[in-house]
Image: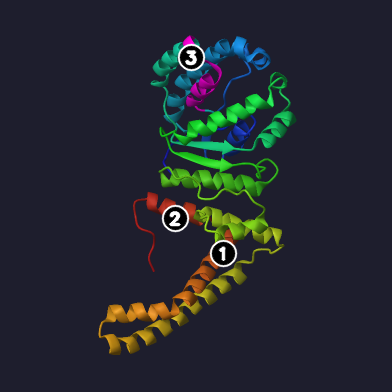
């Protein structure tokens, strides 16, 4: 990962932005910046009468968010990394949802001037959840000023976020579906999210997740077989969770021996390839063509052996508490090639 970085967590109301920021900032060795929203004197009135109080509410938020981010972010990044539970860009998202006509035009002009002075995040973590999940989380935290918020407005906010990030290109975005995650009560879920963030930072490039964890563990293998690809960290997480749910405890020595056995099977298969290659060489007279034909005869079995080896390697990494993706990306980040045999 870069020496210092700025991670901003985004998503609709109730998705868990502040909770995640509080839980991960120390593990990322970063300072914490939380949005100050409770001081907005128009917020509770806004949820009661959106049309009447939208402009006052939005302008107050715009100036408050500008003051906080302009004063804090640059100073913090001189000494430390930073995790925040909001982006300055979100203010415009809500303004376009709640304002129109001259009020929106005035807002857009002011926002354009202020936004130029706000540092952009190195990574935006976009948290998603279904409407019923958001409503449940909002009810549990029971903030007084949110009690008058309608489900229709929350649905509009969700759609605004989806539209916003569908075309957002200012910074890399990591999208995480939180419907089946409980980062407060389940350490495995928190580890999964943290690992995804670390991997995205280590890669240094925008890479949307290849498959969200949306199904029970029993169905995740089917998801892979259906062709919905995962990142390496997702595959490692899947092995860990399915083994736990199956009651299979990790065993360092057993998994190491299993890996040795799989590698030995690969060696045996390649031995058969080399024998067949020599026979084909006598017929075709070209070593490259002979090897291609020999491999074709054994490729199905080799594929199975390689998959078995990868599964054993992922389990062994789980036994050791090592994220293979994070370690691999860290090695690349150092500017050198991965180690060779």
Q: Residues within 10 Å of mark 1 (few under 14, many from 20)?
A: many
- The residue sitting at 70% across, 43% down in the picture is 185
- The residue sitting at 43% across, 38% down in the picture is 172
Residue 170, position in %: x, y?
A: 41, 32
Q: Depth-wise, is mark 3 or mark 2 nearer the camera?
A: 3
- The residue sitting at 44% across, 75% down in the picture is 299
Question: How far separated are the C-alphas under marks 1 and 3?
Answer: 56 Å
Element at label 3: helix
Question: How far separated are the C-alphas under marks 3 and 2?
Answer: 47 Å
Q: Is disc 1 in contact with disc 3, using a CB cutoff of under 8 Å?
A: no
Taking 22 as reference, is 74 left or right? Answer: left
- The residue sitting at 42% across, 47% down in the picture is 203
Q: Is disc 3 in contact with disc 2, using a CB cutoff of under 8 Å?
A: no
Seen from the viewer's position, the closer of residues 168 and 238 is 168
> Is residue 214 magenta-colored?
no
Q: Is disc 2 in contact with disc 1, using a CB cutoff of under 8 Å?
A: no
Taking 85 as reference, is 340 left or right? Answer: left
The quadrant of the rendering that contains the C terminus is bottom left
Q: Residues within 10 Å of mark 3 (few under 14, many from 20)?
A: some
The segment highlighted magenta reads 87-102
- Residue on which disc 1 sits: 316
- Residue on which disc 2 sits: 328
- Residue 213 position (above or below residue 87): below
Q: Depth-wise, is mark 1 or mark 3 nearer the camera?
A: 3
The quadrant of the rendering that contains the N terminus is top left
Residue 200, position in %: x, y?
A: 47, 45
- Residue 296 position (above or below residue 239): below
Task: Using the image, tell me which numbered label, if any, was put on residue 104.
Answer: 3
> Is residue 98 magenta-colored?
yes
- Residue 128 position (above or below residue 116): below
């Amino acid at each position: 990962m870069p020496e210092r970085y700025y991670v901003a967590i985004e998503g609709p109301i109730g998705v868990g932005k502040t909770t995640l920021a509080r839980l991960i900032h120390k593990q990322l060795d970063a300072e914490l910046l939380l949005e100050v929203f409770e001081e907005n004197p128009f917020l509770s009135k806004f949820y009661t009468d959106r049309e009447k109080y939208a402009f006052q509410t939005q302008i107050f938020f715009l100036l408050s968010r500008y003051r906080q981010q302009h004063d804090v972010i640059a100073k913090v990044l001189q000494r430390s990394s930073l995790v925040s539970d909001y982006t300055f860009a979100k203010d415009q998202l809500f303004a376009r949802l709640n304002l129109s006509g001259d009020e929106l035009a005035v807002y857009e002009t002011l926002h354009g001037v202020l936004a130029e002075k706000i540092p952009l995040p190195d990574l935006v973590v976009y948290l998603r959840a279904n409407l019923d999940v958001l409503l449940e989380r909002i009810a549990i935290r029971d903030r007084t000023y949110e009690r008058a918020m309608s489900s229709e407005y929350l649905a509009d906010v969700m759609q605004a976020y989806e539209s916003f990030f569908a075309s957002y290109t200012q910074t890399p975005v990591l999208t995480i579906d939180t419907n089946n995650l409980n980062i407060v009560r389940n350490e495995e879920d928190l580890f999964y999210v943290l690992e995804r963030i670390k991997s995205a930072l280590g890669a240094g490039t925008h890479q949307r997740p290849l498959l969200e964890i949306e199904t029970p563990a029993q169905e995740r293998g089917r998801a892979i077989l259906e062709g919905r690809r995962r990142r390496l960290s997702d595959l490692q997480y899947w092995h860990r969770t399915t083994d736990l749910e199956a009651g299979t405890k990790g065993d360092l020595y057993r998994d190491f021996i299993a890996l040795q056995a799989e590698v030995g099977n690969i060696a045996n298969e390649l031995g058969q390839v080399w024998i067949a290659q020599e026979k084909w060489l006598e017929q075709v007279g070209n070593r490259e063509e002979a090897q291609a034909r020999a491999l074709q005869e054994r490729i199905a079995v080799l594929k199975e052996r390689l998959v078995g080896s990868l599964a054993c390697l992922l389990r062994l990494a789980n036994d050791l508490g090592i994220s293979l993706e994070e370690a691999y990306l860290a090695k690349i980040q150092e500017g050198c090639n991965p180690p060779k045999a």
